[in-house]
Amino acid sequence: MDKEKWEYVKVLIASLVAVIVVLSFYLYKSRLHIERISYKLTVAHKQISELKNLETINRKQKLAIDRLTLKTEDLSKRLSRVESLSEEVRILTEKSLGKKIAYTNRTYALASRGYDLPSDSIDARLSEIEQNINFRENELNSLKVQLENAYEEKISIPHGMPAIGRVSSGFGWRGREFHTGVDIPLRIGTPISATASGYVSYVGWKYGYGLVIILDHRYGFSTWYAHLARAIVRVGEKVEKGQIIGYSGATGNVTGPHLHYEVRINGDPVDPKEYL
């Protein structure tokens, strides 16, 4: 090989070496770049997995929050019903006792979105409140039934005077005649009130009684209001205790204006003094 060719070969070899070195450098840089990309892809994949886990957790938490919110709203509605029931019981108690009573409304703290508590802790608190509400509601319903019965008995059994006045003649024998009620002297036109709630069973004239109103009540009770000047109720009409049913007069066998008042049980006259 001549010198000129050898020089050409050396240049060619040197060029190949340079190319190999350059290629090796670029391959090294490419490998580093690929490794960086691979690392970033691994990190990105990990972040995507974490995001998916967070999304699953958030979805579960949202479902739990929605469930707790619905339960809280339901308990709030039930609590409102219990408070209304409690108010009904208070009114019935006052009616039964005939006087105002001190009243304190019991309240419960319900869970909300603002609670910074674990879901199971909120569940436990809501369950406790629900048990308290159930107990209170059952207690109030039972008490309401008892009070309604007691109040119904109170207003259905004759009690009190049918008009403001004094008894001039009592129940019992007067000589050879048995007096089946009490007499209350009144000015003609004095309002006469029902002494118990009930229904009007008779309005009209009876021998000796003049114009009379008969009211039927529960438990076999009835009340008679005689010698009236005027009646303002009709047969079949429901009347409440204390309602004005007519006005006193002097009709029938009388020596002066007065009200003849009777209380009967299952049709038999009893002494009204026990119910005045």
Image: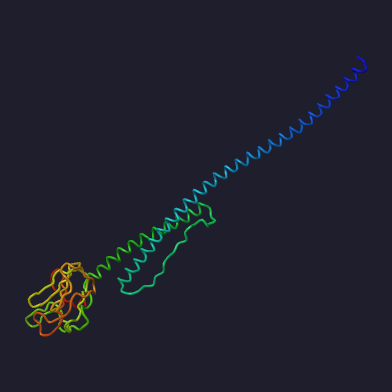
| Extreme residue in the front direction | 4
The quadrant of the rendering that contains the C terminus is: bottom left
Q: Is residue 215 above or below residue 139?
A: below
- Residue drawn at (8%, 78%), measured in percent from left and top? 208
Quarter holding residue 79? bottom left
x and y, in percent, of residue 61 in the image = 52, 49
x and y, in percent, of residue 231 in the image = 16, 75
Q: Is residue 176 above or below residue 199?
A: below
- Residue drawn at (30%, 71%), measured in percent from left and top? 95
The answer to whether residue 176 is left or right of residue 168 is left
The answer to whether residue 140 is left or right of residue 247 is right
Quarter holding residue 8? top right
Total numbered labels placed on residues in the image = 0
The quadrant of the rendering that contains the N terminus is: top right
x and y, in percent, of residue 140 in the image = 35, 63
| Extreme residue in the right direction | 3
- Residue drawn at (39%, 63%), measured in percent from left and top? 83
Quarter holding residue 135? bottom left
x and y, in percent, of residue 222 in the image = 17, 71
Q: Is residue 160 above or below residue 15?
A: below
The way the protein has been coloured in the rendering is rainbow
